Amino acid sequence: MSLAQTRNGVTFLLTFSFALLGITLLLGANPRAITATFSFYGLADIFSTTILGALSGLGMIGVAVTTLAARMRLAPAFIPFSLALITVTIPLLTLLSPSRWVADLGGFPIIGSGQGIIKYAAVLPLIAFLFYRDKFTTKQLTYMNFAPVAMVLVWIGGMKFYEFEANGIVGLIETSPFMSWLYTVFTVQKASNVIGSFDILFTVLLGAGIAIKNKPLIVASGFACLSVFLMTQTFMFTVPGTFNSDTLVNGLGHFVVKDQWFIANLLVVAYFTLGKSDEQIA
């Protein structure tokens, strides 16, 4: 992919996902997540969930609109950067709350509701690629965009080996025409182990491919990692009730839409490791 194509792809994924998340929050989606986030700051006792959700939604829509405007040179880059920084920092700081971790299993690093929160780490590297490429080296931008992919796949992949996570994904797997076969071959736990092993293995291989500049390895492992995030997008259509007439999507929809950020991260990694002939990782 050319630079223009990569930038356009990243811009689309960022603006579409943030716009969708923002609109659904304005419509009142995912109130439990809103309450959990702002309770950390003591704001849930001051403002209603409706108000906090609306403010969050406006912030996300602001990221989408200003990112697009900055790409069209209608706004300075610091505006989408600033909005994105605020939008991702607010939830990320809540990882300091014990409620984000599974207390029965000892807390950190056994992540529970924080699984959707760590995904926000994918956003700022994308903003850096879109607007601040001249501030970083090719190597820095490559690893900045690989890091959130590796973090989420290894961390959440590792959780697949725990019973609570294996049981938690049953509703996703058994309704999927692409993955339900796993339960005819394996038990619930073993199927989860297979998924976790897949995530971790190909993340390690992608990292190795980048490090040793092996393009065939990058292509094979990169497509494998990409398939994980493409598969989660299908859950929006295969899990009953994900779409609804009131808020467009439910909490599951919010969780998987964020995976579009990792698709964008992988596009950036592919551009710098496969698509550039004049500027290789040094």
Image (spheres, grey):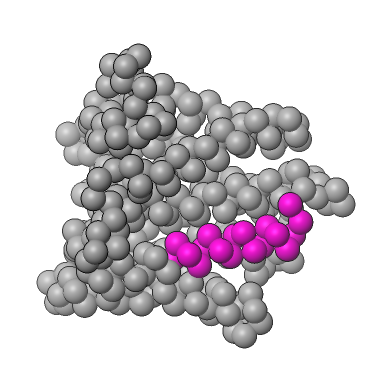
Is residue 194 shown left or right of residue 49? right
Please name the predominant secondary structure of the magenta segment in the image: helix
Image-quadrant location for residue 5: bottom right
Where is residue 74 drawn, in percent x and y?
Answer: 62, 85
Q: Residue at x 21, y 77 (%)?
A: 51
For this orientation, the residue located farthest to the bottom is 74
- Quadrant where the C terminus lies? top right
> Which one is nearer the viewer's eye here, 74 or 47?
74
Tell me if residue 2 is in the magenta stretch.
yes
**Residue 205 visible in the shown view:** yes
| 140 up-or-down from 273: above or below | below
- For the image shown, how many numbered marks are present on the structure? 0
Q: Residue at x 17, y 34 (%)?
A: 104
Region rendered in magenta: 1-18
Tell me if residue 52 is in the magenta stretch.
no
For this orientation, the residue located farthest to the top is 185
Q: Residue at x 35, y 47 (%)?
A: 237
| 141 up-or-down from 22: above or below | above
> Which one is nearer the viewer's eye here, 225 or 111?
225
Where is residue 186 drawn, in percent x and y?
Answer: 33, 15
Is residue 104 shown left or right of residue 85? left
